[in-house]
Amino acid sequence: MAGYWDTSPPHPCERLARMEGASNFLGLLSGQEAGPDTTEDAAALAMCRAAGGVPEALEARWAGTQRDKVALCHMVFDTLKVADKDRTWTKAAILDGFYLFSGQWAKVGDHRGRAKTFRVRHDDYHTVRKYTERLLTNLANDSERPWIQARFTGG
């Protein structure tokens, strides 16, 4: 992790964080003629998907976007075989894992307290939470290379 006085260039995917919420529409209404150009970044996301990547995971990781939270959490839930009685706490653990993955640690409580709330063993809760975080991290890692290649080499 880079410090405050680190002069090394930022990771290329940090461009996705700057792209979050950027729109020229309101700027044009207020009389600004030019805003941030995110065309190439967005096109690279589409090319990343065509190469088998999951651009939603990249955006959640680098920009902390909540737009695809439900879809990513459902994708993780579908990889697990969950008994009907365990569905509620499993979904809560998956949501916690998503928040950890997207850098929103303030929304995540201690896994022991959360497990106690749902009356489940804390090891089970913690395992599902870590599984979610690692699965989403692997998806984002696997999507970084196709996005960088599409963005900076032109395809």
Image: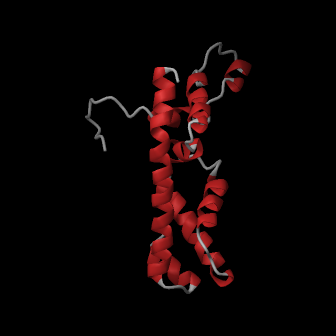
Can you say whether 44 is above or below 88 in the image?
above
Does residue 103 appear anywhere in the picture?
no
Labels in figure, total: 0
Question: Where is residue 131 shown, x and y percent of the image?
Answer: 48, 66
Asked whether 6 or 80 is in front, the reply is 80
* 147 over 91 or under it: above or below: above
Q: Residue furthest top?
A: 33
Residue at image position (44%, 80%) is 123
Residue 63 at least partly seen? yes
Give the vertical position of 30 relative to 140 (above or below).
above
Way the structure is coloured: secondary structure
Residue at the location (60% across, 38% down)?
49
Viewer-side residue, 62 vs 57: 57
Q: Position of residue 65 (x, y in %)?
A: 58, 46
Residue plotted at (56% across, 87% down)? 119
Q: Which of the two residues, 110 or 130, is positioned nearer the viewer here?
A: 130
Q: Quadrant of the N terminus?
A: top left
- What percent of the width, then of the height, locates residue 66? 61, 50
Instruction: Identify the residue at image location x=57%, y=44%.
Output: 54
x then y, percent, for residue 144:
46, 39
Residue found at the very far front of the displayed protein:
51
